[in-house]
Image (spheres, rainbow, N blue to C red):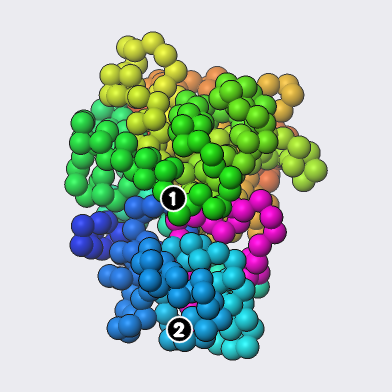
Amino acid sequence: MLRYASYDVAVGEKLIARNTVEQLEDLLETFRVVIVGGARQTGKTTLVNELLERAPGTRFTFDDEAVRQRAVEDPIGFVEALPRGASVAEYQRAGEPFLLAVKRRVDRDRSRGQLLLTGSASYLATRRPVETLAGRAGRLVLWPLSQGEQRGVHETFVARLFDAHGRPPTANAPTNRAQLMEAVLRGGFPEVVSEALTGRRRRSWYQSYVHDVVSREALRPLVDIRLEREMLTLLRLMAARSAQELIIAELARDAGLARETTANYVALLEALYLVQPLPAWATNATTRAKRHPKIHLVDTGLAAHLSGATMSDLSPLTPGRLLGPLLESFVVGELSKQATWSERDIALSHFRDRAGAEIDVIVEDRDSGAICGIEVKASATPTQRDARHLAYIRDRLGRRFTLGVVLHTGDVVLPLGDRLWAMPVSALWQDV
């Protein structure tokens, strides 16, 4: 069970939520090894070095060439010498022999909380089978900061969807449209938020960030990356396709790449925690597996930078389609972050059928099977028509359907039918 605590608004130069510390401490009490993943610059080092109470001499990083070399040359000896409760940053850089040595140690000693591994690239990025530490390791993904984390608010929107009894969760005073658009453009990387970067400074930060992640030599052994330009092109294409279905053949055609190469690059971007696929939902598991996921970048500030979006591009007076997809990705990101600390076992997906019905996000309580639907509209004036697909799935699921919500850029809460409501996007970070 993951608990929720109050927030530390600032730690060093980064913002971090104390609820993440509580989750991590729970995992360390449950598993022999805990793996913390997440994109670079989401606060993993801050989390371990400044928030966890760790004894001196227990922190190691494979960004240190000398430390990594010792682990590569003698993985078993290195792991056996690690003190109990040690943390190892960028663990994936020492390769699979290090993980096999970890497995050997924790199979001999089954005590909890022996090792804490953090990394900005998943070891599952390789194309061949690797050691996964299945049954031995607990996992936590550190996302960019949620809106509640940035505002010091205890967010309960996802959890309260299933306690609504046909009525929506209580909404905050709405955030005005300009503030909402700025939140979309800012994203949630701690340094961008804590330094209040805007304009050219923010563009420079994201430009440097993308270059560092894509061109980083240490990540290249994970897959066969031959040309940095190909990766950057593909990442920009995916940003432009935010909130669309991921069809590899079409992406490969537009990127001018082979299908297999494109699939490998997409897998790497997901392993780097830059891309978040949202799987398709269907009542039948086999049908679900055959459908395409939607693609979202993990942070809308990054997506906006890559697609060249500015505040004027998100204006209702500006023609184009940047606002809708970015806003949908923004909502998906906020729901995903809340799902990680919800007391419920939450799954997120999207719905689309052959008749043309689409729902941006399906929120499912895995334990009870209850379903909530979320539609995201860039309009400030929601209507009953905006909820027609929610009504369609409500009628198919009956009482299993708990609530349908149309999130919009306006400031009203309106009933749109049986168990259907319109709410401002700011309801996501309500404080109750």
Give the residue type at disc 2: Leu
Report the residue marked by disc 2.
82
Q: Earlier in the sequence, mark 1 or mark 2?
A: 2
| Position in image of residue 24 (x %, y %) | 44, 70
Q: Is residue 180 magenta?
A: no
Q: Is residue 406 visible?
A: no
| Position in image of residue 141 (x %, y %) | 48, 58
Can you tell which of label 1 and label 2 is closer to the viewer? 1
Report the residue marked by disc 1.
217
Please state if 355 lies on the left or on the right of 263 as rendered: right
Please state if 301 lies on the left or on the right of 254 as rendered: left
Q: Looking at the picture, does residue 152 appear above or below residue 331?
A: below
Question: Which residues make up the magenta segment?
Answer: 112-134
Quarter location, residue 119: bottom left
Q: Residue at x 37, y 37 (%)?
A: 302
Q: Looking at the picture, does residue 230 appear above or below residue 149?
A: above
Q: Secondary structure at mark 2?
A: loop
Q: Residue at x 61, y 27 (%)?
A: 257
Q: Residue at x 55, y 64 (%)?
A: 95
Mark 1, residues whose alpha carbon is within 10 Å: few (<14), some, or many (≥20)?
A: few
**Secondary structure mostly taken by the magenta-highlighted segment of the chain:** loop
